[in-house]
Image (cartoon, rainbow, N blue to C red):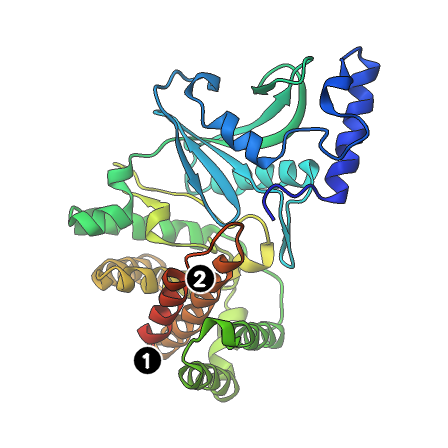
């Protein structure tokens, strides 16, 4: 879907084109009468890969593609550009939608990374049709602008390099404990919460069972069957969490690569594009992290974070609830992995189906 101009974006471009023509700009340069009025995502990526376009002087730009964004790393900053995509669970198909999402990402993430998220900046088009970064022309797209974090201090890298220590991990646990403790509870009933978990479990199964992924169907069915049985047999465990105010707007994508072990740790990439995906039990958020730490061969890291959380919050949920959340999140992570195969370009089929299979085996 990258590079495709949605109908809403086309109308936005026509509207802005009319505004620019009224201001005396030479709109004839932009191909009036065709759909290619403004640069597509490929042209934007090529432009943003050039070191000379950035206000912070840099000798090189590292370009990284994620499922939903392009990220451009200069020597001191990171510029995140949302892809013009639309899925069932998000809509980035127009510049207005991407602007709203950028603003929400900055707002939400300043809670756990207050000095990292610098703000929102425009990609503009000049009077002669030239692209400019935060220039004086017409805004045609938007960035989240961030301070660049040291790559060697990201938790996934520190685990791989064996440079992470217990004191640093405890600081992360303390940061998360404060964050979870200060978050107001989300208003929903116990039955609504259990129904949502059941529906999500079945949705995970429906996607993962598609024959093109060639995942172990019997294993998947066994995992989902156990999840649904646990929800039926232990409703009080979930109901107690709701009544205790433990369902909050959490992080929603708590992975080692989003945790930076600076002198005071910061946690980035809190999930912003769909509120429902971050309405969670903190224990589920931590189980999500535990899966990734186990996959990287460092379960002690998430165990220590969970221990710190329990010590600082006084929240001691039963181990069987943690086991449920690990199983539930394993299927969710597997689903996210196979959905990468729907990205633009030639997919790395073995990598992502192998990753999905790995998550399923982590909880058997």
The disc at residue 337 is 2
Observer able to see residue 41? yes
Q: Which numbered mark, 2 or 1, is in the foreground of this view?
A: 2
The one of 364 and 41 positioned closer to us in this rendering: 41
Measuring 76% from the left and 43% from the top, which residue is drawn there? 7
Measuring 81% from the left and 17% from the top, which residue is drawn there? 21
> Residue 239: percent from the left, percent from the top?
53, 76
The one of 364 and 86 positioned closer to us in this rendering: 86
The one of 22 and 151 positioned closer to us in this rendering: 22
Cα separation between marks 2 and 1: 18 Å
Total labels: the figure holds 2
Q: Report which residue position mark 1 lands on.
A: 364
> Residue 91: percent from the left, percent from the top?
66, 49
- Indicate the quadrant where residue 148 lies: top left
Q: In the displayed image of the protein, which residue is found farthest to the top?
A: 24
Is residue 134 positioned above or below 241 on the image?
above
Observer able to see residue 316? no
* Circle 2 SS class: helix
């Amino acid at each position: 879907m990258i590079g495709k101009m949605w109908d809403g974006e086309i109308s936005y471009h026509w509207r802005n084109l009319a505004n620019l023509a009224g201001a005396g700009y030479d709109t004839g340069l932009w191909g009036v009468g065709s759909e290619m009025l403004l640069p597509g995502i490929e042209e934007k990526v090529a432009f943003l890969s050039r070191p000379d376009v950035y206000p912070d002087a840099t000798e090189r730009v590292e370009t990284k593609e994620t499922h939903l964004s392009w990220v451009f790393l200069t020597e001191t900053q990171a510029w995140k550009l949302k892809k013009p995509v639309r899925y069932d669970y998000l809509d980035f198909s127009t510049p207005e939608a991407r602007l709203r999402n950028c603003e929400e990402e900055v707002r939400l993430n300043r809670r756990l990374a207050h000095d990292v998220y610098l703000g929102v900046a425009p990609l503009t088009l000049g009077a002669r049709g030239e692209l400019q970064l935060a220039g004086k022309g017409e805004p045609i797209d938007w960035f989240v602008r961030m301070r660049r974090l040291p790559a060697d201090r990201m938790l996934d890298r520190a685990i791989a390099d064996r440079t992470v220590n217990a004191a640093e991990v405890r600081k992360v646990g303390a940061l998360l404990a404060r964050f979870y403790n200060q978050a107001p509870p989300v208003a929903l009933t116990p039955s609504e919460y259990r129904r949502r978990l059941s529906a999500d479990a079945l949705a995970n199964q429906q996607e993962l069972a598609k024959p093109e992924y060639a995942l172990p169907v019997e294993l998947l069915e066994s995992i989902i069957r156990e999840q649904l049985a646990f929800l039926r047999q232990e409703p009080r465990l979930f109901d107690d969490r709701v009544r205790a105010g433990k369902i909050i707007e959490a992080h929603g994508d708590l992975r080692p690569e989003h945790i930076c072990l600076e002198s005071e740790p910061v946690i980035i990439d809190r999930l912003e594009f769909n509120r429902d995906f971050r309405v969670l039990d903190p224990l589920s958020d931590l189980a999500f992290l535990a899966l990734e730490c186990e996959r990287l061969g460092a379960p002690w890291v998430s165990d220590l974070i969970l221990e710190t959380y329990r010590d600082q919050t006084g929240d001691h949920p039963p181990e069987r609830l943690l086991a449920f959340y690990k199983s539930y999140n394993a299927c969710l992570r597997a689903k996210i992995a196979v959905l990468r195969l729907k990205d633009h370009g030639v997919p790395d089929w073995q990598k992502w189906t192998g990753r999905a299979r790995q998550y399923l085996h982590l909880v058997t």
